[in-house]
Amino acid sequence: MTYQSRWGYHPCNYETFLKLRRLHKAYYEGLSLLARWRRWRAKRPHNRRGPEPVVPDVVRWVCASPIGAEFQAARHGVADPTQVKPIGISAEEIDRWVGLLE
């Protein structure tokens, strides 16, 4: 299904786009959390300071998904509705991830 805006045709409506934007932000925050956890894990146990950084499962799922490409596809409109590629992540999965993030 395609949606038309002032800038062209998009693969999702505006509400879904806002959810994708929230997941895209969580993706980059998650990369930072995962890097912090990897740095903590790489140290030997007697050199570790503080508790182990917590990385929620939903952050791992979002970081393992193609959310960056899906967000960019939804963000930029195309001139012809036949050129619109559908989003590869289901709407139910997007809703579930956004619900788990909040």
Image: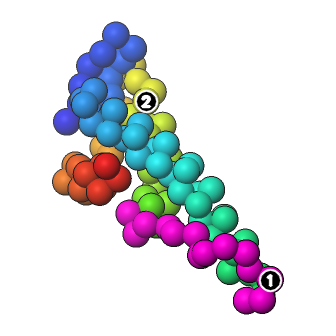
Q: Residue 16's quadrant in the figure?
A: top left
25 to the left or right of 100: right
- Counting from the top left corner in percent of width and height, residue 3 is at 24, 25
Amino acid of disc 1: Asn
Circle 2 residues within 10 Å: few <14, some 14–19, many ≥20: some
Which residue range is magenta in the image? Answer: 45-58
Q: For numbered disc 1, what is the local secondary structure?
A: helix
Farthest top residue in view: 6
Residue 80 vs residue 73, the one in the foreground: 73
For residue 2, above or below residue 42:
above
Amino acid of disc 2: Arg
> To which residue does mark 2 refer?
75
Q: Specify the label residue 39 is tagged with.
A: none
Q: Is residue 65 visible in this depiction of the protein?
A: no
At 36% from the left and 18% from the top, the residue drawn is 8
Earlier residue among tags 1 and 2: 1
- Counting from the top left corner in percent of width and height, residue 23 is at 41, 46
79 to the left or right of 51: left
Q: For numbered disc 2, what is the local secondary structure?
A: helix
Magenta span includes 102: no
- Counting from the top left corner in percent of width and height, residue 79 is at 39, 19
Cα separation, mark 1 vs mark 2, equals: 44 Å
Q: Specify the label residue 47 is tagged with.
A: 1
Residue 33 vs residue 13, the one in the foreground: 33
